Structures are given as structure tokens and as C-alpha cells.
Image (cartoon, grey):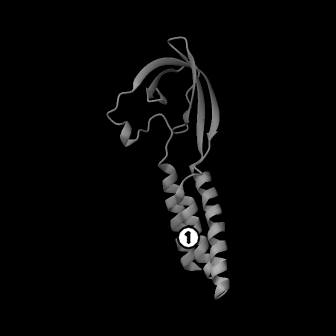
Amino acid sequence: MKKIGVLLSAVLSVSLLAGCAGDLSGSTYSREDARKVQYVRYGIVESVTPVVIEGRTDGPIGSAAGAIVGGIAGSTIGGGRGSNISAVIGAVAGGIVGNKIEESATRAQGQELTIQMESGEIISVVQEVQNKEFFRPGDQVRVLDRNGTVRVAY
């Protein structure tokens, strides 16, 4: 049982680290974004609405890690064919639980920004809140656009 606890702890740590990799804030850039042209427009924030950005449910880490831990835990129950059946049931249950843990760990606080652009156009952008700091109505912002991926920054 002690080995299973250590393995489960390692799996959860990996899942949480994987969740940090998908930052949706306005100041985080992927390697592919570096040295690429972004089009810049200016606007004024009209309103800010707190939102929740759902966590990942398509990531393999939570499901796979949960299935491994569940399979190992299940295989320790029973003997012979019972052990094999328990391992399969444990793997399925562990995969479901691991997926839920990953979704919860990657959920983020977001903000929906309604912005009046200099052109007169009104747009809405949702992005992750960084350092618990929301934009405020009246803030003058830059709206950066690269191939349809938009971010809002000061």
C-alpha cells in the first residue's frame, strides 16, 4: 500500500505540473509566438466580467496516470483471474478519476473583457486572470492579434 501512495503522489504532481503548462493569460507566449508579427490595435475596456475557464478534459496525463495507479491498486485485490479483473476495473475507475483531477487542476479564473476599439468596433475577449489582477473599465489597452489568437495587454 505504501508503494501505491508514493506512486499516486507522483502522478498527482505530474498532473498538476501539466496543468500549469496551458496558461491562457495575456502575457504568456508559446515558443511558436516568439519573433512572429502581431497586429496591434488600441481600445478602452468598457466592462469586465469574471468567468471560469474550464479545465482540460482531452489531456492524456490525468487519464493515463489514473489508469496506471488504478490498475496497480486493483491488481493487489484477489488472486488469479480475480486479480486480473480487479486490475481492469481499477484501471478504468482510475482513468475516470484521473481525468476529473486533471480537469479540476487546469481550471482557471478568467475575465471577459468588452473593449471599445479606436475604430468604434466593440469586441469581447476572454483570457485568464494573471496574479489575481483584473482589468478595470476605463483601462486603455492594446489588443494583440496573431492569426486569430487575441490577447489583451496594457
Residue 77 visible from this viewpoint? no
- Relative depth, front residue between 106 and 86: 86
Image point (61%, 52%), residue name: 103
Where is residue 121? Give x, y as percent. 55, 14
Image point (50%, 17%), residue name: 43
Indicate the quadrant where residue 85 lies. bottom right
**Relative height, residue 150 to residue 13 (above, below):** above
**Relative height, residue 87 to residue 23 (above, below):** below
Residue 57 visible from this viewpoint? yes
Question: Regarding mark 1 in the picture, which secondary structure is present there?
Answer: helix
**Relative height, residue 88 to residue 22 (above, below):** below
- Relative depth, front residue between 21 and 134: 21
Indicate the quadrant where residue 96 lies. bottom right
**Relative height, residue 83 to residue 11 (above, below):** below
Q: Which residue is mark 1?
A: 68
Left or right: 40 as drawn, with respect to 94: left
Image point (34%, 32%), residue name: 36
Q: How many marks?
A: 1
Circle 1 packing at 10 Å, graded few (<14), some (14-19), many (20+), is many
Image point (54%, 65%), residue name: 65
Where is residue 120? Give x, y as percent. 54, 11
Q: Which of the image's four quarters has the N terminus?
A: bottom right
Q: Residue furthest left?
A: 35
Where is residue 129? Give x, y as percent. 55, 37
Where is residue 81? Give x, y as percent. 65, 85
Specify the amino acid type for callout 1.
Answer: Ile
